[in-house]
Image (cartoon, rainbow, N blue to C red):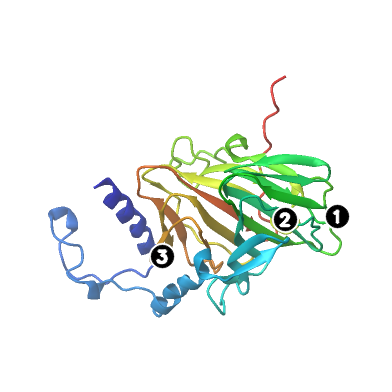
Amino acid sequence: MRRVALVAFALSSVALAQAPAQSGGAQNAINGINSYPGPEFIKYEPDRELHDHRIDLFLNGWQGSMPRHEHGSLVLRDILTRGDNFAPAEKGAVLQYGNFFAYGRLAPGNSTTPSRLEGHQEVYYILGGQGEISAGGDTAKLRKDIAVFIPAGLEFVIKSTGDGPLTMYLINEPTPAEFHPKNKMAVKDEAAAHQRTPAGGDPYVVAGASGHWGHIVRELFSPADGLATEQSVITVTLNPLTMGEPHPHRPGQEEVWAAIDGESLAFLGTEIRIQRPGMAYMLPPDATTIHSNINAGDKPIKFLYFAKFPDGDNWRHGAAPAAPK
């Protein structure tokens, strides 16, 4: 019953964005009678149905894409690619700022060829397996929930050292002509990353969450770490029977949500879709279509999130507390 109540609560948010319903003359539901005698009295915005069903173009999984190779033996399956934030020509072609977002697989015992990124940079978020990455004289171990940022111009090699494949999400961003990249890779353990605290005294933020009702945010990479186009790479966790605050995005905001752990209900416009690991979406930034994710299960779920925000927005990551001496 709690799951049903949570989903019903989410769906009620849609009504806030719709035109007022005509009165059917029925008594109020508090008296045990439906507020509306039939669905014909619930009036939605005209022509919204076609618009909302197009949300499937903004949600995609890697299983339906053809494999391709990068850096030698790293096999990629695209999830989101370059296209149009508002009117993608094909499923997943929604990125106007990032180059692509993909699922990667490096077979056991394989290594990438020594590579340098020219005109672009990459973030790797490890989903499973064991490995190591070497760049600029530094070497780091790779396992689940380790994130790595590789700047442009830095030679690097990735090795898969476990019995199973090394799997990952990969974010590829362009670098502007005038951009000066870092000369070191950055490595973050998601479990030890700085956890964001609420910006203000919002009474609807769940205890222990960072904002947007139930979002628990851990900060991975920002422009201070060397990002050129993307402005925030974080993880967002939702505890059981919690959800994010439904809200829209303004033009200029390119925000991607990729499932890492667990299954959720993705609430997009007036539609609900099941989002599983390997799937990602970008909300059309039309200032009208709302989104949220709902954890109706009994275990925490986690997402990888990256975004470019409209000019002038306050997107900066909070400062991590200094380590005790």
Is there any visible trace of residue 34 in the rendered image?
A: yes
Q: Residue at x 41, y 53 (%)?
A: 263
Residue beneath disc 2: 112
Q: Earlier in the sequence, mark 3 or mark 2?
A: 3
Q: CA distance from mark 1 to mark 3?
A: 44 Å
Dot 3 and dot 2 residues touching (CB under 8 Å) = no
Q: CA distance from mark 2 to mark 1?
A: 25 Å
Q: Residues within 10 Å of mark 3 (few under 14, many from 20)?
A: some
Residue beneath disc 3: 17
Residue 101, picture quadrant: bottom right
Instruction: Give how far across and how far down residue 158 sits, in percent.
Output: 71, 50
Residue beneath disc 1: 180
**Vertically, is 307 above or below 207?**
below
Q: Residue at x 13, y 55 (%)?
A: 32
Quarter that holds the C terminus:
top right
Q: Amino acid at mark 1?
A: His
| Mark toward the viewer: 3 or 2 | 2
Q: Amino acid at mark 2?
A: Thr
Which label belongs to residue 71? none
* Nearer to me, 204 or 138: 138
Residue 276, picture quadrant: bottom left
Q: Earlier in the sequence, mark 2 or mark 1?
A: 2
